[in-house]
Amino acid sequence: MDHNQDIVAGLDIGTTKIACIVGRKNEQGKIEILGMGKSRSDGVSRGVVSNIQRTVESIMAAVKMAEDNAGVDIRQVNVGIAGQHIRSMQHRGMKMRESLEEEITQRDIDQLIEETNRLVMPPGEEIIHVLPQDYIVDTEQGIRDPIGMSGIRLEANFHIISGQVTAARNINKCVHRAGLEVTELVLEPLASADAVLSAEEKEAGVVLVDIGGGTTDIAIFFDNIIRHTAVIPFGGNVVTEDIRQGCGIMREQAEQLKTKFGSALASENKENEVVCIPGLRGRDPKEISLRTLAEIIQSRMEEILEHVYFEIKNSGMEKQLIAGIVLTGGGAQLKHLKHLVELMTGMNTRIGYPNEHIAKSAVEDVTSPLHATGVGLVMKGFDHLERLRGKMVDTRAPRPAKVPVREHSKGLLKGLFERIATTTDNIFNEDDN
């Protein structure tokens, strides 16, 4: 099969929607989105599957729609995981190597990652990602890429992301029951980060805040390395719930009010702006002031942003994040939210659209912040394919006979050291004269 014809599907199992996005790589190496399917997510609450059957039905509906749009059959999907059970921690792994002659290879790094994957976690938890941050070879610290170096002791600082075994199992169960296979389980903020952040931002220091329906996901990067991840169990749905209770209206009406007229800054709305909502059967319509609506939204968004700011401070990176904050997810579409974030954190903020890394697509809706995670999952799928190919090449390549080469190289080195030794002796002798 031609590599260019590889098709990857990302499945974003969210709290408000389940989205399936299908893509392939074009000749320029950009990802081209072929189709997308969406369905309402009734079986997920706060990022965690709470009803298997409903989730399976929603997955099947979204995948079927994506298949019809893209004209392909989907067998495997890259799936996102979130939820408040996600934890991240730092760990240092170490591996002693056999000899100094053989340089460090990708295989050494893979073995180190595999060993870290086998770490014993607290009961009920499992490792989702092991992300190397930097390496230490013997005593040389802060190495980004140790491949090709010589050293006996290889160490790495890892960012480990773990989650509840049951949450991951339930996601796998839903996908399998929908007749699909899971290629990889990916932490959602990592996928979103791939879709909306530029390499410069990751280098300079940036906070990705993905405001979804049930959770707000955070990923902090600095020096191109992931430094901190967190999932806050609040999202756009709690805002809708507050509007429903505060205005005494139906949930659907509250959602429409929020998306059409909502604002995150009450001061931006005039006192006299009102919107009229039809009453229930035979009852009078309700008039709701947009100022009141914005006050309800602002107070809840402030609470979510306080959690976000706490995580930024908690990461210890607050002063180094030159690129500030990038907002994405459905919640990022809220009017004036950028201003509120800047007011509360004092950090430069922009809205992240997943259109930087993808080719122009006939699927219009795909460049909305709403689909950052789905697009990111497709990108992660292609990364996964490339890693697999690299391993296949690695195992297939015939290994040259090493013994004679090594003897020869030893001789060369020996000769070289002897030459250096004699020249240094000469220098010292000359100095003595």
Image (cartoon, rainbow, N blue to C red):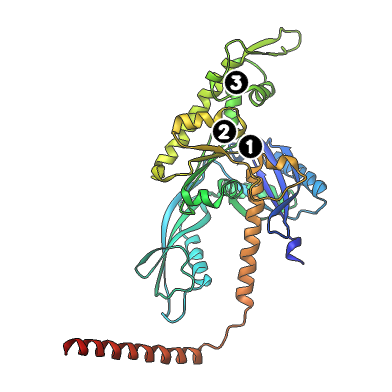
Q: Residue 243: which disc?
A: 3
| Quadrant in which the N terminus appears | bottom right
Q: Position of residue 82 (x, y in %)?
A: 57, 44
Please give left or right for residue 422 compared with residue 20 in the image: left
Whether pointer 3 and pointer 2 mark residues with C-beta atoms closer than 8 Å, the reply is no
From the viewer's side, name the closer residue of 415 and 250: 415
Q: Position of residue 44 (x, y in %)?
A: 64, 38
Q: Which of the marked residues, 3 or 1, is nearer the chain's N terminus?
A: 1
Q: CA distance from mark 3 to mark 1?
A: 18 Å
Q: Position of residue 54 (x, y in %)?
A: 71, 39
Q: Amino acid at mark 3?
A: Ile
Q: Is residue 66 visible?
A: yes
Name the mark nearer the viewer: 2 or 1. Answer: 2
Q: Residue at x 68, y 21 (%)?
A: 253
Whether pointer 2 and pointer 1 mark residues with C-beta atoms closer than 8 Å, the reply is yes
Identify the secondary structure beneath mark 3. Answer: helix
Name the mark nearer the viewer: 3 or 1. Answer: 3
On screen, residue 431 above or below 20? below
Q: Position of residue 354 (x, y in %)?
A: 64, 45
Q: Residue tagged by mark 2? A: 235
Q: Amino acid at mark 2?
A: Gly
Q: Residue at x 48, y 54 (%)?
A: 225
Identify the secondary structure beneath mark 1. Answer: loop
| Quadrant in which the C terminus appears | bottom left
Q: Quadrant of residue 15?
A: top right
Q: Residue tagged by mark 1? A: 15
From the viewer's side, name the closer residue of 247 and 352: 352
Q: Amino acid at mark 1?
A: Thr
